[in-house]
């Protein structure tokens, strides 16, 4: 299954949309590691900054994007079946 590409917000930040058409499910921020390579921080997004949380660090933007799942449940329309559930 392929996920939609993240929306570029600025040079180092992307917004990831899934089930909700208005609010992002996650944000991905690129940082440079000590060795000079890029690292992509996956952040669970919430309108309340206190509820945002780091979900993982990945080597590629594509891998970080793949970790953000659709909501399969009773809280609105469900996205394509992904065989996994989670708050990513």
Image: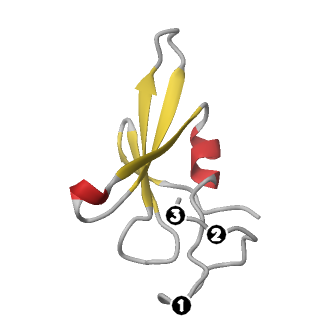
Whether residue 7 sits left or right of residue 58 in the image: it is left
Asked whether the beta carbons under mark 2 and mark 3 sit within 8 Å of each other, the answer is no
* Residue behind mark 1: 74
Could you tell me which residue is drawn at 58 percent across and 45 percent down?
64
Residue under label 3, please give it: 87
The residue that label 2 is drawn on is: 85
Image: 32 above or below 16: above
Q: Are marks 2 and 1 in contact (CB under 8 Å)?
A: no
State the image coordinates of residue 21 (x, y, percent, origin top left): 43, 78
Q: Looking at the picture, does residue 73 appear above or below residue 8?
A: below
Residue 76 position, x and y percent, is 48, 89
Residue 28, percent across and down? 44, 45
C-alpha gap between disc 2 and disc 1 = 13 Å
Nearer the observer, 74 or 25:
74
Q: Can you give x and y, in whole percent of width and height, for residue 41 in the image?
A: 46, 38
Which numbered circle lies on residue 7?
Answer: none
Q: Secondary structure at mark 1?
A: loop
Figure quadrant of residue 63: top right
Disc 1 residue crowd, few under 14, some 14–19, many 20+, Cα 10 Å: few
Who is closer to the viewer here, 25 or 88?
Answer: 88
- Is 78 placed above or below 54 here? below
Residue at 47%, 87% (x, y): give it: 75
Secondary structure state at the residue bearing disc 3: loop
Name the side, left or right, on which 36 lies relative to 48.
Answer: right
CA distance separating discs 2 and 3: 7 Å
**Helix, strand or loop under label 2:** loop
Say which label, 2 or 1, has the lower sequence index: 1
Res. 77 image quadrant: bottom right
Mark 3 crowdedness (10 Å alpha carbons): few <14, some 14-19, many ≥20: few
């Amino acid at each position: 299954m392929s996920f939609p590409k993240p929306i570029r917000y600025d040079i180092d930040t992307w917004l990831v949309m899934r089930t909700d058409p208005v609010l992002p499910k996650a944000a991905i921020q690129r940082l440079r590691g000590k060795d000079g390579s890029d690292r992509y921080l996956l952040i669970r997004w919430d309108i309340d900054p206190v509820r945002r949380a780091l979900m993982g660090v990945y080597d590629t933007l594509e891998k970080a994007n793949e970790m953000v799942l659709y909501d399969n449940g009773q809280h609105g329309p469900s996205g394509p079946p992904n065989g996994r559930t989670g708050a990513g």
